[in-house]
Image (cartoon, grey):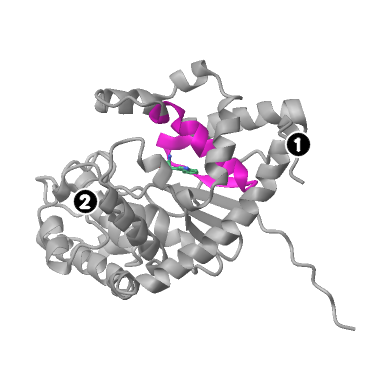
Amino acid sequence: MSEIIKPEKKPIIFSGIQPSGTLTLGNYIGALKNFSLLQDDYDCIYCIVDMHAITVRQNPADLRRRCMELAAIYIASGLDPKKSLIYCQSHVTGHAELSWILNCFTYMGELNRMTQYKDKAAKHADNINAGLFTYPVLMAADILLFQTNMVPVGVDQKQHLELCRDVAQRFNGVYGNVFTIPEPYIAKVGSKIMSLQEPTRKMSKSDPDDTFVALLDDPDTIRRKIKRAVTDSDGEIRYDPENKPGVSNLLSIMSALGAGSIESLTAELAGQGYGTLKTRTADCVIAALEPLQNEYKKLIADKGYLQGILDENAKTANYLANKTLRKVQKKVGFASRG
Ligand code: TRP
């Protein structure tokens, strides 16, 4: 008799990505590269959060283009759009609808405490709009719509995830177990990649161009940026993030891209100059990004294919989102639908 294997429900991972700015090597090593490894053990949802993006002014044509580009980058970095759900937030109406309801369960005082709001309000003093203030509520709606179990978050989003949990617990406290309470997902692998110019700071797309390698930088640009990376003056290739952050960062990059362990790399490069270290690092980065870049070029040239994926996935996402949304609407007492 053949054994019947009941398909087990996999935990759900939800991640929102802003379609703003360039993705960097840091994003690739810290997140993207590992995403494809999660696909088999989790149901992964990657939402391109264009609704969050308009909390600061965007050029419409650029925003539209970057949503497509982001979808292409995700697929090019190994996500299978048949296994993982990659879609645009604005294509799924449930985000806005649940967000409104959750607004009514979130206190002004809670939102006032959000450090990202304070930072952004200071940075965009001429446009402190209500969307900027309620940004974390929309983020909570994103997560809760899909009964998410885990959310990969960096330190900058931890406070928002905490708020999401508080709001979900508050709602559940009143209406019963409607929402799954999400947990932060801490990646097992993936080191932190630092700025090429200020190696004590995290590599960030919002810093000047020469401080990061962009995923789509061409080989010459990558070589130039890495050649100019800040190191130190003692000339020794050794892993010591505290005293030699620049050199250690280059070693971490190589190791994270599969060039060997930090120990073996240091042993191999011992006694050589920083010139060699930088050439080796650039070679590694170029080789690691090449397949992604080639795949990206193919995808971005085929807008029809990408549009098809986004349309198809939006349908699935709408279906899943509406299951939660209808339950919530019923709980709060909205008029029933025939
Ligand atoms: N706020 C997140 C950021 O700026 C993006 C985001 C939106 C998000 N919705 C999300 C992240 C839901 C995780 C889960 O990075």
Residue 136's spot in the image, x, y percent? 48, 32
> Residue at (25%, 50%) from the top-left corner?
248
The answer to whether 135 is drawn above or below residue 74 in the figure is above
Question: For the point 36% across and 63% down, which residue is it?
Answer: 73
Q: Nearer the viewer, residue 334 or 215?
A: 334
**How busy is the neighbourhood of tag 1: few (under 14 within 10 Å), some, or many (20 plus)?**
few
Specify the quadrant that holds the N terminus: bottom right
Residue bearing the label numbered 1 = 177
Q: To which residue does mark 2 refer?
A: 212
The single residue placed furthest to the top in the displayed view is 109
Residue 292 visible in rendering: yes
Instruction: Please indicate whether residue 269 sits to the left or right of residue 172 in the image.
Output: left
241 is within the stretch colored magenta: no
**Which mark, by number, is residue 234?**
none
Which of the two discs, 1 and 2, labels the residue nearer the N terminus? 1
Q: Nearer the viewer, mark 1 or mark 2?
A: 1
